[in-house]
Amino acid sequence: MSTDIRDRLDATVEGNRRLAKLSKDAGYVWGIIRGDTLATIGVVIILGFLFLALFGPMLAPHDPGDNLRGEDGQLLRTDSPTETFSEGAYLGTTNYGEDVLSQVIVSVRVSVFVGLLAALIAVFIGANVALISAYYGGRVDDVLMRIVDIAYGLPFLPFVIVLVFIFGSNIWNIVFVIAAVLWRDSARVVRSEVLTQKQRPYVKSARAIGASDLRIMYKHIFPNVLPLVGLYAAFAVAYAIIYEASLAFLGFGDPELYSWGQMLFQAYHSGAIRFAWWWVLPPGICLMLLVMAVFFIGRSLEEITNPELRH
Amino acid sequence: MTDPESVVEVADLKKQFSADDDLFNRLFGWGEPKTVKAVDGVSLDIREGEALGIAGESGCGKTTLGETLLGLTEPTAGTVRFEGEDVTDRLRTDPELRTKLQIIQQDPYQSINPRFTVFNWIKEPLDVHNIGTEAEREERVLETLELAGLRPAEAFASEYPSELSGGERQRVGIARAIVLNPSFVVADEPTSMLDVSVRAGVLDLLNRLQREMGLAVMYISHDISLLKHTCDRIAIMYLGKVVEQGPATEVINDPKHPYTQALVSSTPIVDPDESRTPIEIEGEVPDPVNLDPGCRFAPRCPAAMPECREGEPRLYDVGEQRARCILYDEELMADASPEVPPEMVSDGMKTPGNRAD
């Protein structure tokens, strides 16, 4: 009876519907962001930084490591913008005569990279721990949640300093170390959401047809906790950026890369941090803007997971 | 006593939940361990193509019974037989059983995963059990949708549950339950969340499927009049026990157990000229934790006697029914018949003294 029915059900119909649903969801998220001025500003700022992260090295007026010299051949050592503007260093120079503007632009990459990757890893670990812990419950839950408790007990800076000291301060280790600290938040909060989803009748329905535990966890429950995971990913990005900058400021950053924290570290150690505002403010303001932008977006995404915030 | 015709047979099924919530009791093992006996020794059998109704008020264990005999929760004790075979230990895991035993849930708004399209939701059982090729699965899903009264099938197939009405969602739930061609389905209050206007349609659909597919269905409901129309046999539950069971018309037209009598008398009659004096039962359902010995209904029973509190009555054969009430214990009642409360007799209810057999 149904060969003609099946013919009518073009395979693309299914695909189109999914696409339509996806764009509807995206439209819904965009609608919430549009309705929130701060979040809109956040999106603009983030798009700007993403652009700089992608094309930064091409846009920077100088190589960030170049030692600029004046017309008289003297190194432009910690000079303010008013003195170096004519030389093409629009934001002044560092104590080695490097262009501050170029360093700030090239540094975007590190913050964005560490922020996104560390947050992704942290949320990936956190969400999986949460799913396994809440779904299986009992002993498994006890053991995993005690590990989360231990992770909460770790003081961030000493822990990170020890790890970076042991493994060396390259950017991958820094990402890993930050993720190792950040996963705990999403693990605990997503777990509580999985606990409530687990009791929903659709899970019972999945059990009744004989779906495996893995299938129930990842095909049934996970898509329903995804909005919360997304929210925690957004906040994790902000924290990862701050943590990376803190590490770099303390001198544990990757010495081969320029980053905002590294710039502040250098300014501090050259003794210029008290007067060389042109060297300190740009990385500081950029950090602040980027983190604020991520928070603004995260804050408005919270409305999706917590509808009570909508009024 | 395995009946070759019975699809599912449960014997002395028990499900207890621990209710030990006091921290100190738990830490030091003080006091009696508390258990809630949600299902306490239920024996039933459901034959091929038969509709069995389970009725009772909230909290009497109807839903737990349904879930336990489907293997959705582990039974504390007792056996479940499927087509004569003891399957108690592999109810949850045996893939073949998971295709044969299905559930239709109460709340169609909660029981469909909101992230699945109707098509994927109904196709999922086929995916899980790896039945047929992709094309065959698609065909099967569309056939099942039509069978469940969702026409045109391909229009519904691509919808998300949030785009459907309650009645349509319940039909989707039914389609998912029957797509694997099961032999036994538990319908847990299948219409209680639906609009009155669509109830009849969903019930008709279930009746038709039952006839066409030779499906054995266990209807769980608190609505006796619904069960009267859909079921061949009815079992009445009170606090985890079956207190009366028998053919649907007999149980409703001529209830034997005082609880059933009260339950039946509380359902309104459609004819306005006819009226029925409701039997008032007093008090509340007792706390199912640590029940007193004796008949569970005794504290509220209008016909209670001192003997009722001495021990749990067994099921007595009364006509075509079986009732768990010592009113039908011939030996006991032979010398105690005057004690039968007069109102029970005047209500036209048969007492052991004047019953037909």
Image (cartoon, coloured by chain):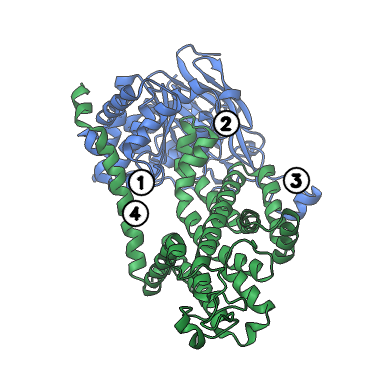
Q: Secondary structure at mark 1?
A: loop
Mark found first going from the N terminus, 2 or 1? 1
Q: Secondary structure at mark 2?
A: helix
Q: Residue furthest front?
A: A72
Callout 1 amino acid = Met
Which residue position holds label 2? B326
Image quadrant of residue B307?
Answer: top right
Callout 2 amino acid = Ile
- Name the spot of residue A61 as percent of width and height, x first: 45, 71
Disc 3: host chain: B
Instruction: Name the colour assigned to chain B in the rendering.
Output: blue
* In the rendered image, the vertical position of residue A290 relative to residue B98, given as above or below: below
The alpha-carbon separation of the residues under discs 4 and 3 comes to 53 Å
Q: Secondary structure at mark 3?
A: loop
Q: Secondary structure at mark 4?
A: helix
Residue lying at 53% horizontally and 43% vertically, measured from the top left: B301
> Disc 2, disc 1: CB below 8 Å?
no
Image quadrant of residue B11?
Answer: top right
The alpha-carbon separation of the residues under discs 3 and 1 comes to 39 Å
The numbered mark at residue B32 is 3
